[in-house]
Amino acid sequence: MLKTPERLTIAGPVGALETIRVPAQGECRAIAVICHPNPLQGGTNTNKVVQTAARALSQMGYTCYCPNLRGVGESEGRHDYGEGEVDDVLAVVESLKAREGDLPLALAGFSFGGFVAARARQRIEAEHLLLMGVAVGKYAIPTPEVPAGTLVIHGEEDEVIPLSVVLDWARPQGLPVLVLPGSGHFFHGKLVLLASWIKRCWERPIP
């Protein structure tokens, strides 16, 4: 029987964080936090890229948490340009581990959310990191280096974060970038392909 998403509230460092929980289809083998794009351009946890990733991971046995970070939707606080949002992610991780148990953790994000997820990974251990259309070079804080096994997916024709900028960031790290031909920043018309490649390329999938 298909398990349906649920809405819940998680206590964050500056107030409540409105969150969508997408349960694993079948046995829950791992947990993931997926971060949304820039709220100043309308990004929320219902974004199609975020929800596409959540569905793909749920089919792989991940229970996914998609929070609205501070100042977004019903979440309390004020948008902090990727600073305080990292603390929000860590609060969500602490809460979901108490709820789900000490399972393997993945961090993921789209655009601004990828930037936040990469910064959160500097402060917490995670089995996997997934960055989609990651916002490299958009903020005063540099996008950090990431672990070698990170899955980076980017659109060939990304009009917001040019592919060349992401390659310049990835090159010194020896980090492969999966390029979706003909895709723009929001993966319009490519979401099925995006989900397929997440499932095919996820490093060391949970058995």
Image (cartoon, rainbow, N blue to C red):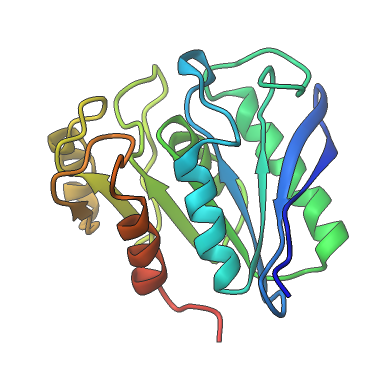
**Up/down of 207 relative to 93, above or below:** below
**Up/down of 176 relative to 74, above or below:** below
Residue at the bottom extreme of this rendering: 207
Is residue 151 visible in the rendered image? The answer is no
The quarter of the picture where the N terminus appears is bottom right
Residue at the front extreme of this rendering: 1
User: Residue 26 location in percent, x, y?
Assistant: 69, 78
**Up/down of 150 relative to 202, above or below:** above
User: Residue 86 location in percent, x, y?
Assistant: 61, 34
Q: Is residue 161 left or right of residue 129?
A: left
Name which residue lies at 66% across and 29% down.
Answer: 69
Q: How many marks?
A: 0
Q: Quadrant of residue 84?
A: top right
**Up/down of 71 relative to 88, above or below:** above
User: Residue 62 location in percent, x, y?
Assistant: 63, 67
Name which residue lies at 26% across and 46% down.
Answer: 154
Name which residue lies at 40% across and 34% down.
Answer: 111
User: Residue 207 location in percent, x, y?
Assistant: 55, 87
Q: Is residue 6 left or right of residue 48?
A: right
Q: Is residue 58 left or right of residue 8?
A: left
Name which residue lies at 82% across and 68% down.
Answer: 101
Is residue 39 visible in the rendered image? The answer is yes
